[in-house]
Amino acid sequence: MIKIDLKTIPQKPGVYLFKDESGKVLYIGKAKDLKKRIASYFKNPSLKVKQLLTEAKDLEILVTPTEAEAIFKESDLIKKLNPVYNQLLRDDTNYFYIIFTQEKFPRIYLTHQPTKFKFFKIFGPFSEGKALRQLLQIIRKKIPFCTCRENHLRECLNASLGLCFGFCCLKEVRPTLADRKKYYENLKIVEKILKGDFKNLKKELLEEMKKLLTEDNLILAKKLQDTYLAIKKIEEEVQILGQDPFFLENKRRKTLLELKEKFNLPDIPRIIEVYDISHFTGSFKVGILVSFYEGFLNPSKIRRFKIKTVLKPDDPRMIYEVLKRRFNHPEWGYPNLILIDGGKIQWKFAFQALKEAELDEKIKIISFAKPKEEIYYDEKKPPLSLKNFSRETAEFLKLLDLKAHQFVVKYHRKLRENERLN
């Protein structure tokens, strides 16, 4: 494994290149803090990282004035050198970029080819396109912006859905200065979200809310509060943007190691299944199973359940039914760890289903109680607060719960919509 003297690596933004014996570049990455990033490679590395560190014989460091310049430098070098390990981590033929076009009302696009557009802001490169699309959709529901390819005479579908202001893409409308100001305020918020600048963004919104409340402007204060809450919800979704894929993989491995230690698991929880329930006052009762492999979502393993035996609103018994049915499918394989949404009662019903399937010695169940952010994991022990975990692991547990909630709500709404149409 390559030997690196961390003392020689600066705590500055830049690009780093792992090379083999002949000087051929194996992998190119970028970092806000080069020293911290390189050090992370040697702490409980994943199999891919171990393989890279074994093949690498040299490390070249290129310091850049800013993190943004490191992003562009990394992109240029990857295109020119096409390193083998960067190819392994791609999920498409090119990297993705988010651009803000250069026009009166800038549009926001996700594209492989940013040079085809005139833009004044660009974010990227990113290797994960699907996650970016989902993220922009989440942002847009609370913070509208335009994506229309051209202006038109009638109101677009996005405007009717509240995803676009409407005035930004209509040919025969003359927007006011107030309209333009409103649009640019949204662009600034989106930009800060994409940069991960949540701390300052939330601080600014809170200060503006306080100001409006002192002026008794309750309507605008309420709108800002909605934006603030929306940003809190999407904060965890943005954490993966722009991160070095190897760094993210290593980070998740450390999280899995911490879960193994905290819950006294025999092995690292490579497979985690997350369960949640949704219903409308006892109607359209559904459950969801969302699977994660090595800390990352595995879409092919998502399973949906219509609740059959529970007639009244009773989440614990619904969890019990879903798990009982799930354990009847050994062909799906079994997880190392199960996380369910709920508190102590939900945990008891889930554990009962596990015990009846005679899997209580093989699988650990934990339950995430959101109001107090506590984890129930043993009937005889008090719950663990998320404060007992590292920040990364606490965020990961919340992300697992959030993903299951999003999938189950989507399934629930689909059933209700189908019923309405029929």
Image (spheres, rainbow, N blue to C red):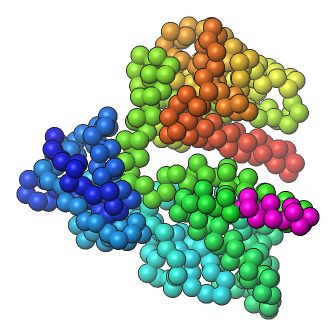
Q: Is residue 78 left or right of residue 147?
A: left
Mainly helix, strand or loop, the magenta region? Answer: helix
Which quadrant does the N terminus fall into?
A: top left
Residue 166 % position (x, y): 78, 78
Relative to residue 56, is residue 270 depicted above or below? Answer: above
Count all numbered tags in the image, as a single digit: 0
- Is residue 214 in the magenta section? yes
Relative to residue 334, is residue 351 depicted above or below? Answer: above
Q: Which residues are magenta?
A: 205-216
Residue 266's quadrant in the figure?
Answer: top left
| Residue 379 visible from this viewpoint | yes
For the point 60% across and 73% down, the residue is 108
For the point 78% across and 67% down, the residue is 162
| Residue 303 visible from this viewpoint | no
Residue 93's quadrant in the figure?
Answer: bottom left
Relative to residue 338, is residue 168 depicted above or below? Answer: below
Residue 150 % position (x, y): 65, 84
Residue 49's quadrant in the figure?
Answer: top left
Q: Is residue 8 left or right of residue 332?
A: left
Q: Nearer the viewer, residue 57 or 138?
A: 57
Q: Nearer the viewer, residue 421 or 72?
A: 72
Residue furthest out toward the left = 22
Residue 276 % position (x, y): 69, 32
For the point 45% across and 23% down, the residue is 260
Q: Is residue 336 left or right of residue 49?
A: right
For the point 49% across and 57% down, the residue is 241
Residue 42 % position (x, y): 27, 40
Q: Is residue 369 left or right of residue 255?
A: right
- Is residue 234 in the magenta section? no
Residue furthest out toward the front = 214
